[in-house]
Amino acid sequence: MGMIAFRSALVPLVLIALCAPALASATTTTKGAIKQLDTTACTVTLADNTTYQFGKRCNFGKLKLGDQIAIVWKQASAARQAVQVFVAK
């Protein structure tokens, strides 16, 4: 009887362990106007004061303050790690 209870508890734990990486890498898209561009820190801050971190080799050449953009990002520890950015048309 103990072995059956153990197996019953083990199945949900295995499913959670298998799904956790997919949940952790889920992305979100946020839209807003650019309030600040920091090319040294590779960050973009939107009008709502939310800051998004880009990779070390960021190129904001086509972006300017006030542009309406959409940022695809994922949570990475305390930072919002940007994956892609699009200028809204």
Image (tube, rainbow, N blue to C red):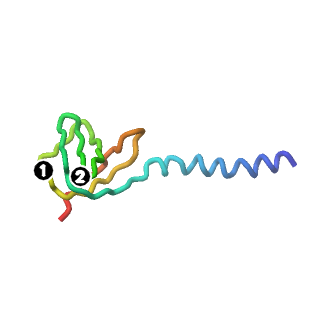
Label number found at residue 64: 1
Label number found at residue 2: none
Q: Position of residue 3 (x, y in %)?
A: 82, 46
Q: Nearer the viewer, mark 2 or mark 1?
A: 2
Vertical comparison of 35 with 55: above or below: below
As drawn, the residue found furthest toward the front would be 48
Please tell me which residue is depicted at 23% across the width and 35% down the height of the picture: 41
Name the residue carrying label 2. Answer: 47
Amino acid type for the residue under numbered disc 1: Lys
Q: Position of residue 57 (x, y in %)?
A: 21, 38
Q: Secondary structure at mark 1?
A: loop
Q: Earlier in the sequence, mark 2 or mark 1?
A: 2
Residue toward you, 44 or 54: 44
Please tell me which residue is depicted at 42% across the width and 39% down the height of the picture: 77
Please tell me which residue is depicted at 19% across the width and 39% down the height of the picture: 38
Residue toward you, 75 or 55: 75
- Which quadrant is the C terminus positioned in? bottom left
Q: Position of residue 24 (x, y in %)?
A: 47, 47
